[in-house]
Amino acid sequence: MRSVLSFAFWTFLLALPAWAQAPARGIPRAADGKPDLNGLWQVLNTAAWDLEDHNGSLRVPAGQGVVEGGVIPYQASMLARKRENFQTRDINDPAEAACYMPGVPRATYMPYPFEIIQNSKLITMSYEFGHTRRSIFTDGTPHPTGFPDFWMGDSRGRWEGDTLVVDVTNLDDRTWLDHAGNHHSDALHVVERYTMTSPDHVLYEATLEDSKVFTRPWKISMPLYRRMEKNVRILEYECVQYIQEQKYGNAKPVGAKP
Amino acid sequence: MSGANASPTGRSNQLMTGANASPAGRSNQLMSGANASPAGRSNQLMTGANASPAGRSNQLMTGANASPAGRSNQLMTGANASPRRSNQLMRRTLLHIAVACILATGSLPALQAQNQNAAKWTAARTPDGHPDMQGMWARRGAAMAESNAPKTPLSEFGATGQPYPTVFNTGVSTPQAATALANRPAGIIEPADRVLPWRPEADAARREFLSHMIPPASLKYVEASARCVPPGLLGGDDRHPYQIIQRPGSFVLMYEYNHVTRVVYTDGRPHVGPNIRLYMGDSIGKWEGDTLVVDTTNFNDKTSFSQAIPFHSDALHTVERFTMVDPYIIDYQLTIEDPTMFTAPIRIAGTFAAAAKGAELMEFACAEGSQTLPNIFGFGLFPGQ
Amino acid sequence: MRINLWVITATAVLLALAVPAAAHHSFAAEFDSDRPVTVKGTVTKMDWVNPHSWIYVDVKDQGGKVVNWRFEMGPVNALLRMGWRKDSIPAGTAVEIQGYRAKSGQPVANAKQVKLPDGRELFSGGSAPTLP
């Protein structure tokens, strides 16, 4: 008997790695069997300020980077542009200076919650920052051809097992990837992966490729945490209005009598 | 009817005008096509084909000549026609379209008879047992147009006609379009004479405000929609569609315009606390039978009702009622109470009409592309602008 | 290069019967109805954006100097839904545009009507011209 138990015990231990790769148990599922991502989510890192390792400074928390390998692989001239961006970030970062929509993947890690609204054909991300929103079509349709770029791109998603894989193109080249001046061109192509690792956690990964700016594709990853408060809802952060008031509140129209 | 040699790569969005008009009567058929392509969509509006011989019909059918992948938008007047031949066919097409249009306006009585038969329709249900209103919609009629609105310089440009080419003045196409919408209630229905029950001091305040808007004396006198202010309940630009999504516990109304999203919670939660003030208010909903009743409070005072009513107070309270009439029509009723402005509630009626098959919500970025404030004030938000 | 214009004619005609009540904001704050303008020139580019798309046109003034004018139109989503695409209006296309001048005095106006040299209208929904 003891040898049977011993055998069972060791077999159990050896089998653990395989079990660790099995789909997370207990996650909520939609009617179509897919993981149910509905709800409010938010990151708890400092990627919005800087995707790479950074120290604290006034009003900027320190952070360990979210870039796999540590460093974003810029082409030399593009790294120079990043450094210029960094120097003038407070007046040139389109998301902070003008409240323009942050693009993908930055909208995910802005320090504000977002709501995932999911059904079997469409997953909508409703971000509290500037009431930014994007539609991820999971109905099998392809990216449109001949369309202009959008601030939040064009997103088409599919499920690979329990992972939502989202292909994003048509991203406007004016967005920055964070407040540190990390940037991209109109060739940016992002592939995101959302994997629920528990009922209240999603592993978010994004691979970025842009042959005009980087030497190779590179990847970020971070957890998303479910907002657990009862009756929590997306509120409003209408920075377009706040910035207009700041910049134009005391201005007079051109040609107005003094 | 021209053939559907849809492009090899894409969505096909075809308008075909039909040859086989009925000999004995009128037909007005709008058919939307969708032979589900493996990887694409077709969005077809076909007029006048295969009409019934004996009278009128208004059918919405789904068909199927889609392209395999991607999109193309083609006006097919004969596939692969030479430019010269396609011009001839184009003229014939335009003639057919003109005829279809005339017939469209003429067939109202038939449609009303049709609607009586439609009374037997019952809605498909969501898993939690409510009418399924999900999909893409065009909103019509929900506007606060007073019958004796004060003259406002905002609307004077109307004398010069529409300011842009025609294609910009229409909205998302709907299969029902003219005939189904023509008889529906629209605009202010209570008071019936559309003379609003103003508090005199509020009426005076808005007239005073209007007098500073052209030219705008300062930022706050620039029309709200020109400043990309979230539209509230009435300020949405209805040339852009709406999308409804239903989940257990919430009803979501997404405006394409200014990418605003209203999540109406139907899970029994209360309104947020009174010091939280929102452009779009805080909405909670409950079902009364098959009507969704939405109660919205916690508005701020920064949105606009209409060109003649450029503001309201944060005492605003609204009740909306959404009732599906048939697969293509949601009846929309909006009751407005703002005791600092009006002495009685005001009721407005509108319609959400199903958008043509294949319509997708698109991004409408507002502040990012707007030149209005730089044009008015002479400078932009970035160095050098 | 041909203009590839695929326009859904009848849709626009049918929709003329059901124009939404709440529409675009007034541009009386930006444009001057007492200063109509008509220019002829060649397209240099288009901005396919919301809330207003823009068409840029090189116009030769009386002295022969070339000035780049900017004309405001409606939201790009309307064009995309009607089948217009980014390559629909190539640079170099000759156009005549009627509109109203911006109050700022800049070479800016709204585009009320955009026509090709042969008289056909663009963006009207009423014709689908092809160019040689």
Image (spheres, grey):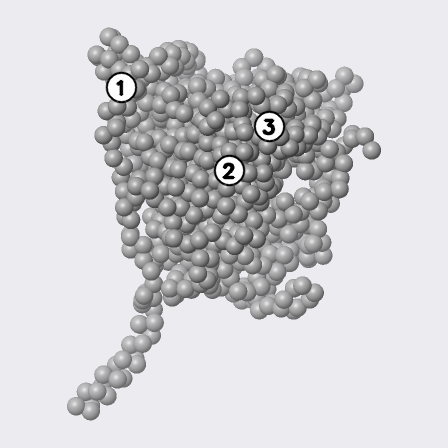
- Same-chain status of marks 1 and 2: yes
Of badges 1 and 2, the one in the foreground is: 2
| Residue A80, placed above or below residue C44 | below
Question: Mark on residue B188?
Answer: none
Residue B50: image x %, image y %?
25, 17
Which of B184/A86 is in front? Answer: B184
Q: Chain of mark 3?
A: B
Q: Earlier in the sequence, mark 2 or mark 3?
A: 3
Q: Is residue B195 left or right of residue A77?
A: left
Q: Chain of mark 1?
A: B
**In the rendered image, which residue does mark 1 sit on?**
B113
Figure quadrant of residue B85: top left
Looking at the rendered structure, the secondary structure element under dot 1 is: helix
Figure quadrant of residue B334: top left
Figure quadrant of residue A231: bottom left
Which of A24/B313 is in front? Answer: B313
Q: Residues within 10 Å of mark 3 (few under 14, many from 20)?
A: many
Q: Chain of mark 2?
A: B
